[in-house]
Image (cartoon, rainbow, N blue to C red):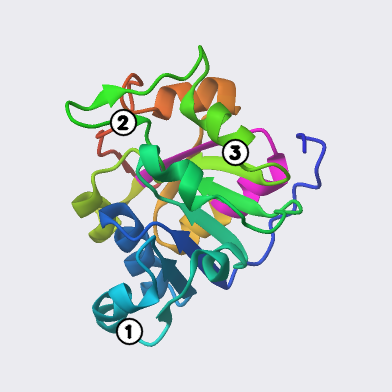
């Protein structure tokens, strides 16, 4: 879909997270704190997440990847090498919003994956036919993302970029609900490159937006 989509944000009450590593858990923590329901999933199955969801509270539950993919908005927070298997055999996305919080890191050595001349979010878009992809929540370190977004009289900045105006509006509303300040970097071609780790200038920057 394009920027011609209706720009009115959609109401989000249920967040699905595919990938329950440090970033996925940090987003889940902030979402639960903001009153959202969260379904966490990973490749090892719901039983492996019992302790994690217990620590997050009653608004969090463990589910399958399919369960997480059925939420109002889906956060993709999976190691780059595991993306194809994590996204295999999922039902059609049918225009739903996916937040791409991945980074194209190949271990060992934090090497940049082969992207064929594109940025990572453009590659991820091809893995999610029918989804409206917004790049966000990938630039902050997990410990910073999990901490109080209210800092020094302002709000911690979370960047976002995407090619669908309505999807970006919805994600920006979600960012605000979580207590962060969203800064829209434009299209995936532009913003996705700025946000990408490794390679982009914005990852690991911890910025605070003060009131005007």
Give the distance between the C-alpha atoms of the residues marked 1 and 3, in whole angstroms.
Answer: 32 Å
Q: Is residue 17 above or below residue 154?
A: below
User: Which quadrant would the N terminus be assigned to in this image?
Assistant: top right
Q: In the image, is 10 to the left or to the right of 67? A: right
User: Which quadrant would the C terminus be assigned to in this image?
Assistant: top left
Q: Position of residue 124 (x, y in %)?
A: 54, 35
Span shown in magenta: 157-171
Q: In the image, is 132 to the left or to the right of 25? A: right
Instruction: Indicate which disc residue 57 carries.
Output: 1
Q: Position of residue 77 (x, y in %)?
A: 40, 50
Q: Is residue 46 above or below residue 7?
A: below
Instruction: Tell me the element at label 2.
Output: strand
Instruction: Tell me the element at label 1.
Output: loop
Residue at the far bottom in the pictured view: 58
Q: Position of residue 195 (x, y in %)?
A: 41, 29
Q: Residue at x 48, y 70 (%)?
A: 64
How many other residues sit within 10 Å of disc 2, few (<14), some (14-19) or many (≥20)? some
Q: Specify the quadrant of the image occupied by residue 19.
A: bottom left
Disc 3 target residue: 127
Instruction: Indicate which disc residue 86 carries.
Output: none
Give the distance between the C-alpha atoms of the residues marked 1 and 2, in whole angstroms.
Answer: 31 Å
Q: Nearer the viewer, mark 1 or mark 3?
A: 3
Instruction: Indicate which disc residue 105 carries.
Output: 2
Q: Residue at x 24, y 50 (%)?
A: 142
Q: In the image, is 4 to the left or to the right of 104? A: right
Q: Specify the quadrant of the image occupied by residue 41.
A: bottom left
Q: In the image, is 174 to the left or to the right of 1? A: left
First in sequence: mark 1 or mark 3? 1
Instruction: Tell me the element at label 3.
Output: helix
Q: Residue at x 69, y 61 (%)?
A: 10
């Amino acid at each position: 879909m394009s920027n011609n989509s209706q720009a009115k944000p959609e109401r989000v009450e249920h967040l699905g997270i595919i990938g329950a590593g440090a970033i996925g858990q940090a987003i889940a923590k902030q979402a639960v704190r903001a009153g959202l329901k969260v379904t966490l999933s990973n490749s090892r199955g719901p039983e492996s997440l019992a302790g994690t969801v217990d620590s997050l509270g009653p608004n969090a539950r463990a589910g399958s990847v399919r369960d997480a993919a059925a939420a109002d908005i889906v956060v993709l927070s999976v190691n780059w090498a595991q993306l194809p298997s994590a996204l295999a055999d999922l039902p059609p996305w049918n225009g739903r919003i996916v937040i791409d919080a991945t980074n194209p890191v190949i271990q060992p050595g934090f090497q940049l994956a082969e992207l064929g001349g594109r940025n990572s979010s453009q590659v991820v878009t091809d893995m999610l036919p029918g989804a409206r992809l917004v790049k966000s929540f990938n630039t902050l370190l997990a410990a910073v993302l999990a901490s109080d977004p209210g800092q020094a009289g302002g709000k911690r900045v979370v960047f976002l970029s995407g090619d669908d105006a309505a999807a970006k509006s919805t994600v920006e509303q979600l960012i605000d609900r979580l207590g962060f300040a969203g800064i829209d970097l434009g299209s995936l071609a532009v913003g996705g490159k700025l946000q990408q780790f490794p390679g982009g200038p914005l990852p690991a920057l911890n910025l605070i937006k003060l009131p005007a």
